[in-house]
Image (spheres, rainbow, N blue to C red):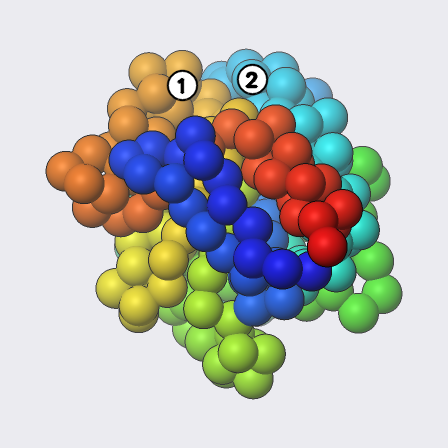
Amino acid sequence: MTEVTVATAAPAPFTFDPAHTALVIIDMQRDFLLPGGFGETLGNDVGRLAQVVPRLAKLLAAARAAGMPIIHTREGHRPDLSDCPPAKLRRGAPSKRIGDPGAFGRILIRGEYGHDIIDELAPHAGEVVIDKPGKGAFYATELSDVLAAREITQLLVTGVTTEVCVHTTTREANDRGFDCLVVSDCCGSYFPDFHRVGIDMISAQGGIFGWVAESGAVIDALAAASVSP
Ligand code: C5J
């Protein structure tokens, strides 16, 4: 496939080579998304995150069809919590903390049902899954090495939550020299205002952290490139 241009991206058209651009799907985990799970026990409306799922599933299908590298991330910790800084543990809501028993197993602990990715977006064989202890996908993970090995220079960033893990990862990637297109309607937040402002912040000031576009524009651009001679 040739280069693809998302003409409606803000602040300017975004051109990428699908072979060297990864679709990054941040933390679409049961603990954050499922009714009765950790996210909901913190008082959040998980329906706001669920809205993202069908759009992200469509984008994921288009990216797979285009042969793009796919990278999933999961926020979580080792069962002994040795990779969870005490400050992060302490700062949880007093009712439910990381490692406590929850409706879907111990909260945000690797290997538990709730820690894994929702069925609708389950990784296919060969797709990369990055387990991250922090909010950013680069901190204390192998992500930099994975991207370097595959000569990936640009990222399409999606997932939850917009203002926390999507933002932190986009900022980390931007500082490491990656061009990031954040796909706005494939990101979600429990807080509509945080989502809106979080998205606006990416492309402000001439694209201070990157570019922003909607998934329809990305899918159309991929489809157009696949039929061009
Ligand atoms: C949070 C995340 N919000 N994936 N995690 O704690 O954004």
Residue 48 badge: 2
Residue that protrudes farthest toward the left in the picture: 205
List x then y, in percent, for residue 202. 29, 39
Q: In this orientation, does residue 195 appear?
A: yes
Q: Residue at left 42%, top 46%? A: 14
List x then y, in percent, for residue 161. 46, 35
Tell me whether the residue at label 1 lies in contact with that at label 2, contact meaning CB atoms closer than 8 angstroms.
Answer: yes
Is 58 or 65 nearer to us in this picture?
65
Query: Dot 2 lies on which element?
Result: helix
Q: How many marks?
A: 2
Q: Is mark 1 within 8 Å of ligand 1?
A: no
List x then y, in percent, for residue 8. 43, 30
Instruction: Write down the residue under mark 1.
Output: 191
Q: CA distance from mark 1 to mark 2?
A: 8 Å
Left or right position of 147 against 69: left
- State whether residue 15 is above or below residue 119: below
Query: Dot 1 lies on which element?
Result: loop
